[in-house]
Image (spheres, rainbow, N blue to C red):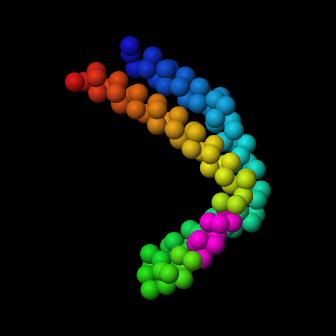
Amino acid sequence: MNKTEILKKVDEIVEYIKNSEEYQNYLKASEILSHETKLLEAIEDIKKYQQAIVKDNTRKKELEKKIQEKENILNNSIVYTEFLNYQNEVNNMLVIFENKLNKYFEDMFN
């Protein structure tokens, strides 16, 4: 198999992933989440609090409490939990492909 054929096969895998039900569900959930201002603000607040902890560890307990409050908002949202589930499905599919490729090349070169 030459380089062109290999790249064609890689393109086929990418197309398979793009067209998969898992990826399509993820895209839909991502689109729905993108319109949920309250959830997006909670995500941004969590990031902000995490960065603040790294910069100033003396406020760690206070900021961790705020993070927990924001995580509760997210975890109680069907939109967010569905998004995470679909994201995990896609990630699992990618890990399977990665493991198969790694095994293939490992066998090929050993």
Q: In which quarter of the image is residue 110?
A: top left
Q: Nearer the viewer, residue 7 or 85?
A: 85
Verify whether residue 107 appears in magenta: no
Q: Residue furthest left?
A: 110
Q: Which residue lies furthest to the top in this view?
A: 1
Residue 18 drawn at (x, y percent): 62, 32
Question: Where the N terminus falls, by quadrant?
Answer: top left
Judged left or right of residue 72, residue 8 is left
Judged left or right of residue 41, residue 54 is left
The residue located at (28%, 21%) in the rendering is: 108
The residue located at (46%, 32%) in the rendering is: 96
The residue located at (63%, 43%) in the rendering is: 86
Compared to 67, does 101 lie above or below? Answer: above
Q: Can residue 18 be seen in this view?
A: yes
Q: Which residue lies furthest to the bottom in this view?
A: 58
Q: Nearer the viewer, residue 10 or 38?
A: 38
The residue located at (53%, 25%) in the rendering is: 13
Residue 98 drawn at (x, y percent): 43, 33
Q: Quadrant of residue 72?
A: bottom right
Residue 32 drawn at (x, y percent): 76, 50
Q: Nearer the viewer, residue 54 or 3?
A: 54
Compared to 74, does 22 lie above or below? Answer: above
- Which span is picked out in magenta? 66-74
Q: Secondary structure of the magenta portion, mostly?
A: helix
Q: Quadrant of residue 43?
A: bottom right
Q: Is residue 44 visible?
A: no
Compared to 22, does 67 lie above or below? Answer: below
